[in-house]
Amino acid sequence: MKRKKPWGGRFEGETHGQVEAFTASIHFDLRLAPHDIAGSIAHARMLGKCGILSKAEVEAIVTGLGEIREEIERGEFRTDPALEDIHMHIERRLVEKIGDVGGKLHTARSRNDQVALDLRLYLREAIGQIRERIRSLQEVLVAKAEVHLGTVMPGYTHLQRAQPILLAHHLLAYVEMLQRDRDRFADCLTRVNVLPLGAGALAGTTLPIDRAYVAKLLDFPKVAGNSEDAVADRDFAVEFLACCAILAMHISRLAEELVLWATAEFGFVELPDAFATGSSMMPQKKNPDVAELARGKAGRVYGALLALLTTLKGLPMSYNRDLQEDKEPVFDAADTVRQTLDVLSPMLQAIKFRPERMRAAAADGFLNATDLAEYLVRKGVPFRDAHEIVGRIVRACLESGQHLEEVPFERLRLFSRAFEADVFKYISLDACVERRRSAGGTNSRLVGEAIRQAKRTLRLP
């Protein structure tokens, strides 16, 4: 027997089966059930407070909704595409359990403001989960930085060795990136945390409802100020996806470095067996598949952002069924980011850095050339002249196969009379690192303080 549609009074014929299948969203919005029930309980209590429902009716509805929640948690809740979405499924089940009084739950609300509420409640929860996972990754990075405060490595620009830095300094760069991500999600939460319920289909309701009371019950600090905007707005979802996309980009950059560092050409890290795979053909291979997938997932998250932006760009006010397409990109991006962070933290924890390889790479490639130029600046040589002098010395070293610190003092004096006997102490690897005392630099004291500040920010012991 065909179920009666909630709009059935207007229609004489039945909905085509293919239309029911095409318009149904229950196969993906079932995950909104806990939030739909929470919103419905708050709505029912508000209707009771305002005298629209009796106390007995409210209690019957609230009890019935609680039982439905338990059915869902036990996996006993049955779905039917003819009922389209999670809202109609819960309402129909409520009527089955408590009778016609269940039909009063929808008083003074529409599925338009109901789904907007559910999505906001879902995102509020997801943001908290993602921020905590980001913090866990930061905690691992800070712990690694603390262990490797004395490890010198080459810093890169254009993927070319540039200047010596501390590995701890490099790891803390990602801590900074991730802190911006946590802050962005927190800021996004202020726009997620706006109550749309009570806007109705688009114009509000003639019934004497109390939206502020619902906001209090659901812990929303703000009520949407315009009923049309309340049901049409998905900016908060776009912003969430933008936050996810930026986070995915940061994860991808970290993953890319792990992929590079695990190569024989770099040899900066040793991948743990538990977070690597082999080749079905080449027995010697140890592949960084986890890092590669973490890198690759960024494209998927970017796609979710672009999908929702494209869905929204041509919509007139207020609610349009196109908005059903908002949830799958949001769910997929949230799942992808959470799963990636869940695997990245333990993988990074298990990775072994190879300080000896890093230091050897930092000692090669004239990474102290800038320091040699700045040495001349300290002796009164204009920087542009110092830059040219050191450039000629580097060219000569390339021809002779020497490092800068291996050039005899007498030969250095041929390039500039400003060189003095203290020059070799000045351009030693450790001196190059420790001399960078400008705020935010790679000097070990500054990096140690940055570690302590990060631990304070993250509230770590």
Image: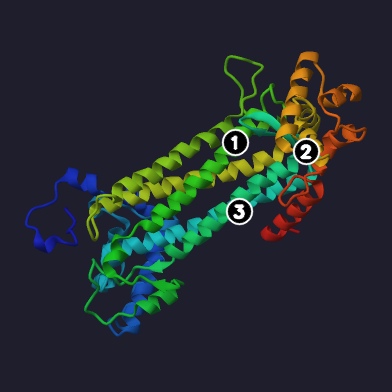
Which of these two is toward me, 72 or 307?
A: 307
Mark 2 or mark 1, which is nearer the start of the sequence?
1
10 Å crowding of disc 1: few (<14), some (14-19), many (20+): many
Between the residue at mark 1 and the residue at mark 2, the CA separation in whole angstroms equals 34 Å
Element on which disc 2 rests:
helix
Amino acid type indicated by mark 1: Ala
Q: Which image quadrant for residue 360?
A: top right
Nearest to viewer (mark 3 / mark 1): 3
Amino acid type indicated by mark 2: Glu
For mark 2, what is the residue?
A: 374
405 to 247, vertically: above or below:
above
Element on which disc 3 rests:
helix
Which of these two is toward me, 96 or 15?
A: 15
Nearest to viewer (mark 2 / mark 3): 2
Residue at horizontal 22%, vertical 70%?
203
Between the residue at mark 2 and the residue at mark 3, the CA separation in whole angstroms equals 33 Å
For mark 1, what is the residue?
A: 255
371 to 102, vertically: above or below:
above
Q: Viewed as shown, does residue 368 lie left or right of 198? A: right
Report x, y in % for residue 177: 60, 48
Q: Which image quadrant for residue 193?
A: bottom left
In this rendering, does residue 253 appear at all? Answer: yes
Residue at horizontal 33%, vertical 53%?
78
Element on which disc 1 rests:
helix
Contact between labelled residues 3 and 2, with CB atoms less than 8 Å apart: no
Contact between labelled residues 2 and 1, with CB atoms less than 8 Å apart: no
Mark 1 or mark 3, which is nearer the start of the sequence?
3
10 Å crowding of disc 3: few (<14), some (14-19), many (20+): some
